[in-house]
Amino acid sequence: MGIISPVLAAATVVNSKQMGLIERMAPPEDISVNGNLIDWLFAYTTGMNIFFFVLVCIGLFGFSWFYRAEDNPVQVEVLAQQWAWHFRYAGNDGIFNTEDDIVQLNDLRLPTDRKVVIQVLSKDVIHSLYFPNARRKVDAIPGRLTRMWWEPTKAGTWDIACAEMCGTYHYRMKASLTTYSQEDFAVWLAEAQEKALQENDPENPELFWGWKWQY
Ligand SMILES: [Cu+2]
C-alpha cells in the first residue's frame, strides 16, 4: 500500500489540465522493447482510414455534384395496380395531380433524345416497371416512392412489362411504350392535353391518384 502525497496528487491534476489536446491524445511514454511497433501499427491503420475516408467522401460528394443536373427532363408518374399501369403527365400547369393532367392507361409516350424521370408507386402489391428495350427496371411498392431515369434513343413501339409476380393476371400486366421524335411528341402532347381538358372530370376522385412531384 503506497501512500500518495497530497502535494504530488495535486501537482499531477494541475499538470494534466495544462496539457494541450494533442498531448492528451498521445499514448503514454513507451518503455518496452516492441511498444514502438504497436504505435507504428496504430498510426498506419489510422492513416489508412483517414486516407480512404477522404477518398470516398471526394467520390461521394464529387459525383453527386457532377450528376446533379436534370436538364429539362420529361416527368412521368406511374401507378401500378393489379393488373394495369397508369401513367400521368403534369399537363399545362406543370403541377401533378391537378385536373389538367394527362392520364394514360397502359400507354406511355415519350420523346427521344430527352431524359425521362419516372416516379413509381403501387396501389396494392409489389410490381416492377420493366422496359426491356432500355434494360431498366424498378420496383413499384405500396407506400414507398421509387424512381428511375433513362433516355430513349429510337422512335418506335416497345413493350413495358411487370417484372414481379403480382397475382393471377400478372402475365396480362403489360403496357406499350411509344417513342417519338421531339416534334412528333410535341404534336401528340398537344392533342393529349386537349383531350384531357375536355374529358377529365374534376368531380371524379379516381382522377387524382397522383402526387406532388418529389424532388
Ligand atoms: Cu404487376
Image (tube, rainbow, N blue to C red):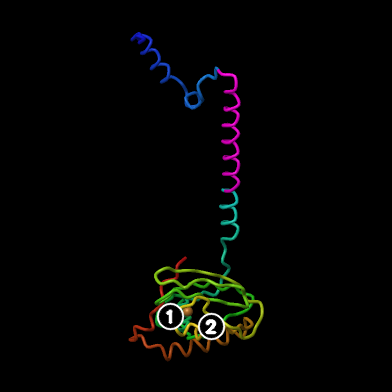
Q: Which is more N-terminal, label 1 or label 2?
A: 1
Residue 71 percent across, percent down from the top left: 58, 68
- Tell me if 111 is positioned left or right of 122 in this view: right
State the residue in front, 213 or 4: 4
Mark 2–mark 1 distance (CA, rounded to whole Å)? 16 Å
Helix, strand or loop for the magenta stretch, by majority: helix
State the residue in front, 13 or 163: 163
Q: Residues within 10 Å of mark 2 (few under 14, many from 20)?
A: many
Q: Residue at x 34, y 83 (%)?
A: 205
The residue wearing badge 2 is 108
Q: Quadrant of residue 8?
A: top left
Helix, strand or loop under label 1: strand
Range of residues picked out in magenta:
32-56
User: In this orientation, does residue 89 appear?
Assistant: no
Q: Residue at x 57, y 40 (%)?
A: 49
The residue wearing badge 1 is 81
Amino acid residing under circle 2: Leu
Residue 56 percent across, percent down from the top left: 58, 48
Q: Residue at x 44, y 81 (%)?
A: 167
